[in-house]
Amino acid sequence: MHYRLKKIIFRTYLSYMILLTVLLSTYILAINFYAFRLLRKQRDDTDIGELNIGDGDGKLLLVSAMGGAITIFASMFAFRYRLDSMLLMLVLPLLAVVNIYCFYLGYRSIFIFW
């Protein structure tokens, strides 16, 4: 192939890789921010009596599976909220390991071609 064409293809490819990296990083930050806000809102609603303890576990588990397990687990200890829930104490660390592995695979697949 012609040298200029190779150079154009490489620059385009590099631009897409940078875009994918930015999108993945933005997703990770956004889902963790949402996880923090969700747990804080549930704690506040429980304190004022609008929500019973145990309500909203499905939301927490869904957000954890989407990538916010580490934030929810750390926030539970920071807020001292729901520490007696055996389900969350067992599932969240497992989901955190799965989240870290998935994020690793996401970044590795982006950087493998650089």
Image (spheres, grey):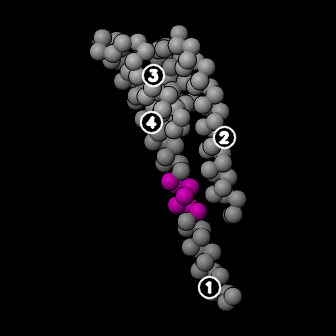
Question: Disc 1 vs disc 3: which is toward the camera?
Answer: 3
Residue with the mark numbered 2: 101
For residue 5, the mark is: 1
Identified by mark 3, the residue type is Asp
Residue 107 within the magenta-colored segment of the rendering = no
Identified by mark 2, the residue type is Tyr
The kind of secondary structure element at disc 2 is helix
Q: Of the residues under marks 2 and 1, which one precedes in the sequence?
A: 1
User: Which residue corresponds to the image point at 40% horizontal and 28% vertical from the top-left?
Assistant: 38
Q: Overall secondary structure of the magenta stretch?
A: helix
Q: Of the residues under marks 1 and 3, which one precedes in the sequence?
A: 1
Q: Are marks 2 and 1 in contact (CB under 8 Å)?
A: no
Identified by mark 4, the residue type is Phe
Identified by mark 1, the residue type is Leu
What x and y, as percent, mark residue 87? 55, 17
Q: Of the residues under marks 4 and 3, which one precedes in the sequence?
A: 4
Q: Of the residues under marks 1 and 4, which one precedes in the sequence?
A: 1
User: Which residue corresponds to the image point at 47% horizontal and 33% vertical from the top-left?
Assistant: 63
Residue with the mark numbered 3: 57
Magenta region: 17-23
